[in-house]
Amino acid sequence: MSHATRIEIPGMYHLVERRLCRGRPAPMGFHDRQLSLAALHGSIYKYGIQLCAYNMLSDRVLLALIPSRPRAISLALLNADQAFVRRFDQIHREVMARWRRPFHCCPFDDEVAWSVMRYVDIAPVRSRHANPLDLHALSSAAEHAGLLRHGLLTAPPERLPHPAAWRAFIESPGDARFVEALELCLRTGMPFGPYPFVYRVEQACGRRLHPACLKWPGLFDARR
């Protein structure tokens, strides 16, 4: 089976996970995460990426976004790294070594967009931190629910959940099988969604991506 890491297809939803503590002795504090989020938002705006959901945790960042051109995600994250390191050195008077943090990325289908955004928003709850709607500063949960407006989400309204429906949706029980399949696709870079979506990604890439085994958990007809 081909390894499909870092597929970036313009106009499609993508889930991105990036570890934040590579090269640092401890996870990042709240203010450093705010600094990193600001640098990331500037880069996303610069490269024309539509940001649909975000969550800046102490050890990683989760993003649901839509690139507008090839390699936009890679270039935006590299640019955010450089801006963050420069600002970090200025504030802390400490030289940070070249910090190239690897990331995982997988495209996902429109049919599962709400569920993937919920996965991003409730990451603190799954990590036993707090209610996601209380984490206003570093996640998009409250912004999706219409409780406040940070201005960090750059996706058009039709690409985002409706606030009234989102509050009930985010509190509904999740599906462990869905989360397991999504995380597997994220680690391997495989497209996440039903068969027709995977075939569309294969046509865009010009090569076969799905395995011969039909029990691959990312290939299911999910309508949530």
Image: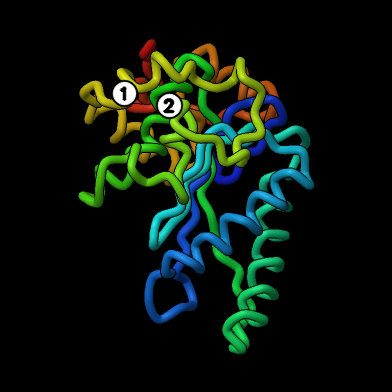
x%, y% of residue 177?
A: 24, 28
Residue where numbered disc 1 is placed:
215
The image quadrant that residue 167 belongs to is top left
The image quadrant that residue 9 belongs to is top right
x%, y% of residue 208?
A: 58, 28
Amino acid type of the residue tagged 1 in the rendering = Lys
> Of label 1 and label 2, which has the lower sequence position?
2
In this orientation, which residue lies closer to the viewer: 137 or 19? 137
The image quadrant that residue 202 belongs to is top right
Which mark lies nearer to you, 1 or 2?
A: 2
Q: Is residue 1 above or below residue 57?
A: above
Residue 145 — which label? 2
Identify the residue at horizontal 67%, vertical 59% (top origin). Answer: 80
Q: Is residue 3 visible?
A: no
In this orientation, which residue lies closer to the viewer: 44 or 78? 44
Residue 111 — which label? none
Amino acid type of the residue tagged 2 in the rendering = Ala
Identify the residue at horizontal 66%, vertical 23% (top origin). Answer: 156
Q: Quadrant of the C terminus?
A: top left
